[in-house]
Amino acid sequence: PTLNDNKASLVAKDFALQTKPHGHGDVHMLIHSSGLAKKWSAQGLKYLMFFQDTNGLVFHAAPAAFGVSSTMKLEVNSITVPRRPGEAVGAICQLVGKEKSLTCNVEYNQLEGLMKAAGFAGDVADEKTGFSPYPGNLNVLVFSIPEYAATLEKSGGMVPEFVNPKYKDAEKTIFKKPTRLECMMQDYPKLLSSEAKVGFISLEREVCFSAVKNNAVDALGKQKKTGFPESACSGEADAYKINRRYLSLAGASVDVEGKDAEFNRIKTKVGAKLVFQPSFACTLAELKSK
């Protein structure tokens, strides 16, 4: 049910409660209630990866993520990219309390306040790199299945819930629109103890992140603001570019960057349109062996 104010008044229309989705954290509940986690564990499967279907490049990072998870015996491993302070993407942080510490995602709109409340200056760029010390969360997570199944058994598949209202007044008394209780899949580590091994890998953005989620108009505005349009033309161009880069690293002579081009006024680069079939090469090492 949706909530209309700070008193959690319910919203009704035509004699029915207005509702909103509970959030993608429910994926853990579905995997638990369907018995899949327990089944996968019994079958001896080792790892499970959640990914965002708008980001096709992430599969270039998947082998590295699985390898690090296996080598370091991580229960949870997040794929991240360097982020700049204030960038609208969640950050992976280590939160240390009196009784518990955990490595987890902190939403970008909560990070600054959290850090200042803890006595830090805030989300400040590193002088050498220009990036935040806290990498950007791509919401791509690798779970060790045996521990994952055991944790879901204890929690019943539930992950922590929260309410995130958007206010229209400075006093924070009036909601812009009704809100709801929700949960996020990346909050799973909050179920774990301090002894649980939770980590992340951080890779260059062009290797593993180029979302395709904006229409042409929104993409143009996003490119002007951040430099990343996150549209169909940029996603396709980036998919070809990373393969050109791999081919160059394998020793071939190829123009990696390509030439400037525009589609619907969205600026991008166009070069050789390279696609590698999985049967040919899934990793740089396999490509170099050809």
Image (tube, grey):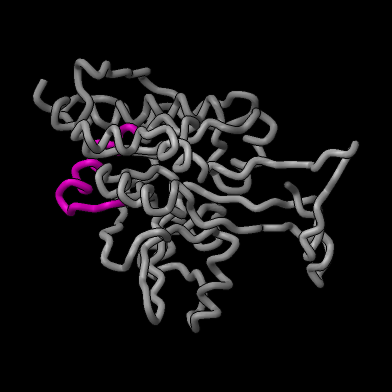
Is 12 above or below relative to 160? above
Left or right, 3 with respect to 272, comes to right
- Give the mark count: 0
Specify whether residue 62 is painted magenta: yes
Start-end of magenta stretch: 59-76
Percent position of residue 16, x then y: 83, 39
Percent position of residue 264, x then y: 64, 25
Left or right, 228 with respect to 224, comes to left
Q: Nearer the viewer, residue 241 or 174?
A: 174
Percent position of residue 96, x then y: 38, 75
Is 90 above or below relative to 40? below
Left or right, 62 with respect to 225, comes to left
Question: Is residue 118 visible from the viewing direction of this image?
Answer: yes
Specify whether residue 24 is painted magenta: no
Quadrant into which the C terminus falls: top left
Percent position of residue 289, x then y: 9, 25
